[in-house]
Image (cartoon, rainbow, N blue to C red):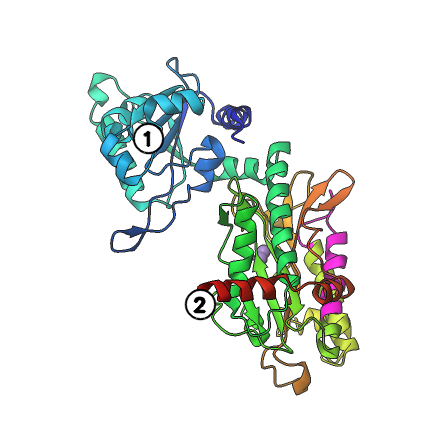
Amino acid sequence: MHDLKEFIRRRKNLMQVMGRESIAILPTAGEQVRNRDVLYPFRPDSNFLYLTGFWEPEAVLVLIPGRQHGEYVLFCREKNKTQEIWHGRRHGQEGVLEHYAVDDSFPIDDIDEILPGLMENKTRVFYTMGIHNNFDQRLMGWVNQLKQKVRMGVNAPGEFVALDHPLHEMRLFKSAYEIRMMKKAAAISCKAHKRLMQSTPAGLYEYQLEAEFIHECMHNGCRDSAYPSIVGGGENACILHYTENNMPLNDGDLVLVDAGGEYQGYASDITRTFPVNGKFSAEQKALYELVLEAQAAAIEMVYPGSHWNAPHEAAVKTITKGLVRLGLLKGRVDKLIKDAAYKPFYMHRTGHWLGLDVHDVGDYKVDGEWRMLEVGMVLTVEPGIYTGDNRKIPKKWRKIGIRIEDDVRVTRTGNEVLTAKAPKTIDEIEALMAAGVVLKKAVKKKAVVKK
Ligand code: GLY
Ligand code: MN
Ligand code: MN
């Protein structure tokens, strides 16, 4: 699936912005220790991945527009028989020249000797400052090394420019290839959410539902999740970033599942909330319908020429009106909105950019104003209502957390919901849950096998 042309085009675009007097230097992420001799699964830095498509650790991308021996230089690990027997395959210098359209490659262990030479007589360094502390220091060391050669006619770069801005602007607008990847991530994740609804999870632990989600994602081609799944039953759904997922799911509660697979580095980010026993109670239904209405109002505001905050404003208005209708807020809607009276129920914003990072890069404001939505942007739309232990409302309304989240792309004519296949109306969910016992059966079968 690695599309060389796509990556060549990205690097070319960036080099055009940089100009010939510049060099760009971008290390990938470092490997992180989990505990003694055990590492967390490696995930490349998203900027690095965007420009290279290369998944090995210990690599540094260097772009030198106009360089005769090649503009795209990659420092990466050398091939090494022993290391590869112990830790896995490496492309090595020849491998990246052959498979990644790299122009010139050097062993990562030689970077101190080679990189200063590549920086000679360049005036500007594009660099993501402040992310990799260690690397920042090494870069300053290389620059100082060059400064000492000034009497030999060598000029050291004097200008450091944040690479983030031009790169993040590029990443904000998704290409046709990226949309294909995001649609795949979305389709697989929708399937996984549907699988959870085809179960009757009462009595299971939250993490067992998480396991089913991951199972379905992996079976369909997502090697990883885009972020740790949130599976919150009952009042746990009111903890926005709940990831302990270690409590039993109780009959009568709702369960909120915020989970998405990652495909070729691209995230999906979906939340669905459904009843553990397959049937919404009256209060659950009323609040759920309200969140769904708010989400529809917000999605309607996603079109070219609308602005970043318009979906949020629509969601806030719908939720505030609805809470008044249900008697959970009292007062005039416009005054309640002005006073942010909805905040104890709805304390987060309605979305974020989505792409290689689940909370993807890109500015939300330009010159102090909310940014206009444009074709090619992808964002989430995710309103919610969380009653928690709010003492100002009758008891029957408390301990309910609901969020409905979809991934939406801005199109020429309006928008496209990439995650529409994950059911979200009450009728769809209840029908699906009444018909399906997939998970219960699967779990029972596994239990028998174990004995
Ligand atoms: N899954 C994190 C979020 O929805 O923003
Ligand atoms: Mn989410
Ligand atoms: Mn989200």
Q: Foreground residue, 236 or 280?
A: 280
Residue 263 lies in the magenta stretch: no
The Cα–Cα distance between marks 1 and 2, rounded to whole angstroms, is 48 Å
Q: Foreground residue, 348 or 97?
A: 97
Marks 1/2 in contact by CB < 8 Å: the verdict is: no
As shown in the figure, which amino acid type bears the numbered disc 1?
Cys
**Residue at x 25%, y 36% (from the top left corner):** 83
Q: Foreground residue, 216 or 101?
A: 216
Which callout, 1 or 2, points to the residue nearer the camera?
2
Res 242 seen here: no
Can you give x and y, in whole percent of width and height, for residue 304 in the image?
A: 73, 42
Q: Secondary structure at mark 1?
A: strand
269 vs 245, left or right, is right
Q: Secondary structure at mark 2?
A: loop
Q: Foreground residue, 385 or 374?
A: 385
Binning the other alpha carbons within 10 Å of mark 2 as few (below 14), some (14 to 19) or many (20 upward) gives: few
The image quadrant of residue 58 is top left
Segment colored magenta: 288-309
Binning the other alpha carbons within 10 Å of mark 1 as few (below 14), some (14 to 19) or many (20 upward) gives: many
State whether residue 193 is above or below residue 124. below
Can you give x and y, in whole percent of width and height, for residue 426 in the image?
A: 75, 66
Ligand 3, what quadrant? bottom right
The residue indicated by pointer 2 is 451
Q: If you read the primary sequence from the N terminus, does the residue marked by circle 1 or circle 2 appear first?
A: 1
**Residue at x 28%, y 31% (from the top left corner):** 108
As shown in the figure, which amino acid type bears the numbered disc 2?
Lys
State whether residue 412 is above or below residue 121. below
State whether residue 424 is above or below residue 284. above
The residue indicated by pointer 1 is 76
